[in-house]
Amino acid sequence: MDASDSRLNCIMRSRSPYILEALKSPVKWWGWCKEAFEVAGREDKPVLLDIGASWCHWCHVMDEETYGDPEVARVINENFIPIKVDRDERPDIDRRYQEAALLISGQGGWPLTVFLTPTGDVMFTGTYFPPRDKAGLPGMVRVLNAVLDAYRNKREQVNEIAREVRRTVSSGIQGGTIAEGNEPDPSVIGGIVTSILDMYDNEHGGFGAAPKFPQPTFHALLLQRGFYEGKALINVVTRTLISMGSGGVYDQIGGGFHRYSVDQEWMIPHFEKLLIDNAELLMNYAEAYAMTGNGEVKAIGTGIAQYLNGELRNPEGGYYSSQDADVDPGDEGGYYRWSIDELRSVLTPEEYQLVYWYYGVFRFQHGEKAVLHIAMPLKDAAKHIGISEEEARALLDNAVKKLREARNRRKAPKVDTTIYAGWSAAAAMADMAAYDYLGLDTLGHALKTVDFIMDKLYINGELHRAYRCSVLNLPGYLDDYAYTLLGALMAYSHTGSRKYLEFSLRLGYDILGKFEASDGGFYDTYLSEDIGLTSIRVKPIHDTPNWSPNALALMGMYYLHKVTGLGEFKRAFERGIKALYQSALSSGVSAASYFINLDWYFANPPTVVVIGDDKQFKALWQTALKTYRPGKLVIPILGDEVLDLIKDEAILGMVREQRRRGESLAFVCAHTACSMPINKAEDLGRVISSFMIDKYVY
C-alpha cells in the first residue's frame, strides 16, 4: 500500500463529518494513526496537527480560508504530514494537546493548531491562523516557514522544547496519589465557594469577564451549598441562570444554549450548540427551580428540554452531539440573526414594535442583523407601544410563533448526528431531572436513551463511545462509562427495574477494572497509545467547563456503594478523593466538580429507600423522586426483583421491617443516621428536606 492509500485508509477510519469533510481540502490530510507518524519519521517531516469540531465556526473559517489557500496547501503538502482530529471523537488527544498549548502559549481552544515532531511531541502551538498576516495575527505561510526553519536548522533546541513540554504536561495532568498525613479538610470547600463568588459578575450574572461561558459545575456546587447555607448562594445562581436565559447566548426562538458569549452581557454568542452543555445546564435549571419555584427559571429550563427533544433527539434513542454555528462560514450565526426588513416582513406592525423593544433590536446599528435577547421587562416594552402587559404577552406569543415558522424555512445549521454514549447519558439524566422538578413529560425519552446505549453501544462487555448509522469502533472513555453509569442508576431510581441496576453494576466494575489507577483516581482511557502525548496516562480533574471525568467516576462509585452496599465501590470513592485532593487544591475553581464529591465525602447526601408495590408505594415513590435535596438518591425496592444485588444490611433490615408491617414504607438516610419508617407521602417530603440538615453546615 503506497502513502496515498495509507492516508486515505487512515482518514476514512473516522466517521466524523468534520474529518470526512477534509477529503475535499487541497491539503492532503491524514487522520490520527500510527502510519502518519511513521511516514513523518521516514521522510523526516514535522507534523501539523489540527484539532477542531463540526460545530466550530473558526474551524470552518480556517478550513476554507487558510487550508483552502493554494500556497498554504502547497507548503503543507510538500513539507509536513498534516493530521486532522475531531475533539468530540477523540477527547483524549484534545485534552493532552490543549494542556501543551496552555503551557506554551497560554491559550487553547478550537481550532487548535499544533506542530509536532515525528514522534508526536510538541514544538509550537497556536489556534486560528489566517493565510497571511492579518489584524495582528501571523499568517499561516509565515508560521509554516518559521516552524520548518526551526525543525531543520535548530533541531536540538526543538527537541529540548519537546522534552520539556512532555515532562511538564506529564507531571501537570497525570493527577495525584494518596499523600500520607494529608487528609482532606472540609474547610477548603468554603474556600472554593468564596473563590467562585469572587468571580461573580454582580451586574450581568455569571462568572468572570468576556468571553463568558456558562459554568454548570459552579452552579451545581453553589446550589448544593446554598441549600444548607442560605439563600445568598442560591440567589447568585438564580440571577445567573435568568441573566443567561435573557441573553443572546440563549436561543430566544428555538430554545437551548449556544456555547458561550463573546461579551460580558451574554448578548452576542458564538452560535454552536452542544448536547453536553445543554444537558448539564438543564440539570442546573431543574434543580434551581426545585429550590426557588422561580417561573423564569422554569421557562428557560423548559426551552432547553424542548430544544434537546425537538432538534437533537434520535427517534430510536440517544441524542445527536451538536449543531453547527452557522450555515455559511462567512455569515456566522446568520440562521439566528434578524434584519429589520426580515422582522417587518414576518410580523404585524404592532408585533414588530413589541419585538423591537422587548428583544433589543433597537440596540443594533442600522443594517446590522440583530441577535434577539430580552432587553427589558415585558411590561416596559408594552409601555413603549401603549398596551397592557397581558396584551403584550399574547402578542409576543404570536410573534414568537411566526418567527419560529419563518426561521424553520431557512436552511438550518448542520446537526452532527453522531451519538456519543456519555453525552447521551447526560441528556437522559437531564430529562429525568426535568421530569422530576420541572414536571415535563421527558421520562420516556430518558429511558429510551439508556436502553439505546445498553442495546447498541455496550457490546461484549465493552462500552463503545459513538454510534453513527452503526456502532463505531471507538472505545468508551472514562466519562462515557461514568455518565452512562449515572444515567443507568437514575433509570433504576425511576423504574425499579433490575436491568438498569445490573447494567450499572457492570459499568461500575468496568470502571474499576479498566480505569482505576493503583494509586487512586481514574485514568481517562484504558487503551493507551504509543504516539506522542497520548502515551501519557492522565487523571483528568479540570472542568471544561463540563464535569470532569474523575468527578463523574467518583460520583458513580459513591452511588453504587449506596445502592448495593458493596465495599469495593466505597473504597474506590475514598481512594479517589484522597489521591486527587492535592491536584484539586492546585486547580481551585477549575475542579469545582471534584469539590462537589468532596462535600459528599464529609456529609453523605440522603438516600431514600422506598419499599412496597401498591398505590401507597407509588405515592411515596413519586414524592421521593420529586422532593429536591442535593445529591439525593432514590432506591426503590419492588418485591424481590433486586434484593440479591443488594448487600447493604441497613437496607435489607428495612425490607424485613416493611414485610413485618405489611405496608409500603420509606426510609430516609442522611449523614450517618436513618429515619424511622414513613408511610405517608406528605411526611416523606418533609423528612427528605429536613432530616439531619444541621449536620451539613460546616
Image: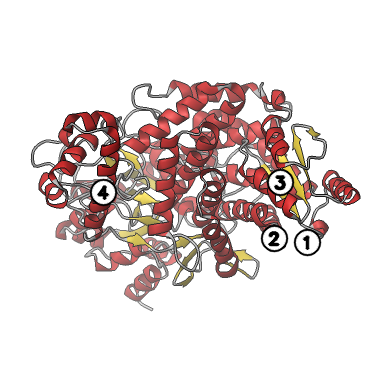
Say whether residue 165 is left or right of residue 456: left
Question: Image quadrant for the N terminus?
Answer: bottom left
| Residue at screen point 63% across, 32% down | 581
From the image, tell me which residue sits under label 4: 398
From the image, tell me which residue sits under label 3: 620
In front: 20, or 45? 20
Q: Residues within 10 Å of mark 4 (few under 14, many from 20)?
A: some
| Residue at screen point 28% across, 68% down | 23
In front: 654, or 536? 654
Image location of residue 216, percent across then percent down: 47, 38
Q: Using the numbered discs, state the Cα–Cα distance from disc 3 to disc 2 in whole angstroms.
A: 17 Å
Q: Using the numbered discs, state the Cα–Cα distance from disc 2 to disc 1 in whole angstroms.
A: 8 Å
Image location of residue 278, percent across then percent down: 43, 47
From the image, tell me which residue sits under label 1: 641
| Residue at screen point 35% across, 59% down | 84
**Colour scheme employed for the rendering of this structure:** secondary structure
1 or 4: tag closer to the N-terminus: 4
- Say if residue 209 shows up in the picture: yes
Q: Using the numbered discs, state the Cα–Cα distance from disc 4 to disc 2 in whole angstroms.
A: 43 Å
Question: Image quadrant for the C terminus?
Answer: top right
Quarter where residue 492 is shown:
bottom right
3 or 2: tag closer to the N-terminus: 2
From the image, tell me which residue sits under label 2: 497
Q: Measured along the vertical axis of the image, is residue 214 above or below residue 641?
A: above
Secondary structure under the numbered disc 3 in the rendered image: helix
